[in-house]
Image: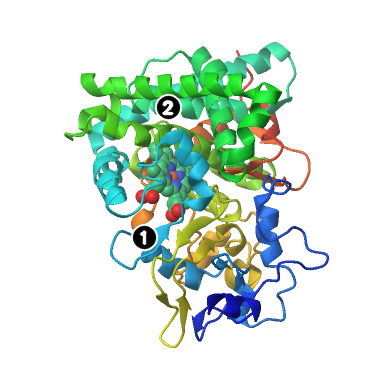
Amino acid sequence: MRLLQQLTKKNPFGGNYLPSRVSLLARNRVSLPFPHLWNYREPIRILDAYFQSVDDLDRSGKHNRYLDVPFFPAVLVTRDPTVIKPILLDTGDKPGQFDRDTLPTDGIARATGEDSLLYSNGEQWRMQKKLAAPSFGKTKLFQPEKFAEFEQTFRKTAADRLEVLREQQAEAQASITPLELEPEISAIMLEMLVNNFFGGSVSYEDIQQRYVPSLTLMIDHMVTDTIAHRIQAPLNFLSGKTKRLNKAQNDFETLTDIALAGRKKGLGMWSQFKSEATDDQLRSNIRVFLAGALEATTSFAGWTFTHLARSPEVQEAIYNEVESVDIYDPDNLAQASNLLQALQETLRLTPSLYFLPRRATIDTTVKIDDEHELIIPKGTHVLLDVWHANRCEDIWGEAVSGYPATQFAPQRWQVLKDKGYSAKDLMHFGFGFGPRTCPGTSLGMLEVGLVVGAFVKMFRFSADGESVSPRAGVSTKPSDGVTINIEVREPYQ
Ligand code: HEM
């Protein structure tokens, strides 16, 4: 039946809010609509392929597209928030709810372990969530005493590193110096996580020269391993990459040991961690937190710098706001509206996690509104395409927010607020939504807010070109490595 349906191109979805079909082969398409060895490094182009030539379709067909190839389960790609939101809300461990699709992340699982919060589903996910997620939550992190402790150490880490940059610039004896900022951002982010959050004491040189390169190689390997698992090993062996990967894997394990070692002494966030779980039961999660947090915070901060470098007015507005702020306590952060809007806008326009994968565990009805529903057949791979949802003119464009959807315009958040939109009406899903929302939201916002605030306070920066294209792997990053020209605001004494 199913094969016949596929051969006759019958729409496998039900209800009155139907996705439209994407053909496997089409002329003048930016990419084939599935990953293969030649296009997997450009996943956003693969998603682009789903939304080419859709302007004449009705709303459901224009924003919801499917691929249905004989012998394979259907793939639904949606950039429609009215579909994305109920699916995120209905993802979890209750019977019939969506799972997180493990297919696009099996390279991550091979490197971190299958029982982590990120990879597992069902009972195991629930257990890991109870165990590990609260440590990062607002209630734990934002307790006045604990928050002050983290904020102070985070702030000191950021200030020390930025001071080094400032000294380097003074030595260069140039008022404006070009700089590739991404390696600096990664090192600051990893240092905050390993030393301040997990209570480690790794030297900055080791963080910068040993652990960041190793984790970066591991993260890159996770992407390739997802697509080319079987053929990768011989290719790596022939090219000599196996040796580098083994070293990176060892460094990853050592860093995981260092993060776990603080537990016995109650250092960093471990002082708040109450659980009977053995260290071994926590290992996969710690690996995911280390690699995932490094990747996501570097992406988020990198994009923020990329956008601000091209928006001098926004940069100055943030400077005026943070100039007199020395302590980033929750009140001060909440009042830094220009900084917060710039962070929101960054996550909207250039979300770190550009698609969220789901899988229907049974035939599932998704309620769109009082009159519309979409029935998704069991086994369908669902890609919630946050990248394209957030760039869709119908959803975020001038008519709604006063600015084109593809423009970096933090002011749009004020327009939306003035028009009476609440946070729940318009969602960019930058940290996900629903039961599998990001447990690191508060920590990530604090880290990125602090680093961006401290940087703007110390430097004025600009960049060439109107925009930068994304390079996407586990997350998206600016393809130029965040290349900016920096100028110290106050001349170095
Ligand atoms: C600041 C930048 C960050 C961004 C933009 C971000 C984004 C996200 C998003 C969008 C999801 C949802 C994925 C989905 O629904 O499929 C997610 C989940 C997750 N994030 Fe983050 N994240 C960030 C920081 C962090 C940090 C700092 C940690 C931990 C230390 C973390 C750990 C996780 C984990 C473990 C999950 C899986 C949760 C689950 O499935 O229950 N993230 N993140």
Q: Residues within 10 Å of mark 1 (few under 14, many from 20)?
A: some
x, y percent for residue 318: 55, 42
- How far apart are labels 2 and 1 at the CA level? 27 Å
Residue 324: in sight, yes or no? no
Q: Residue under circle 2?
A: 192
Judge left or right: residue 384 versus residue 483: left
* Amino acid on which the number 1 mark rests in the picture: Gly
| Numbered disc 2: secondary structure | helix
Tag shown at residue 434: 1
Query: Which of the 4 image quarters holds residue 434?
Result: bottom left
Instruction: Please report the residue visible at 70 percent of the width from the left and 74 percent of the height from the top.
Output: 54
Is 102 above or below relative to 284? below
Q: Dividing the image into 4 quarters, which one contains the C terminus?
A: top right
Is 110 above or below relative to 345? above
Judge left or right: residue 416 versus residue 45: left
Is ligand 1 less than 8 Å from the beta carbon at label 1?
yes
x, y percent for residue 382: 51, 64
Is 445 above or below relative to 69? above
Q: Nearer the viewer, residue 371 or 282?
A: 282
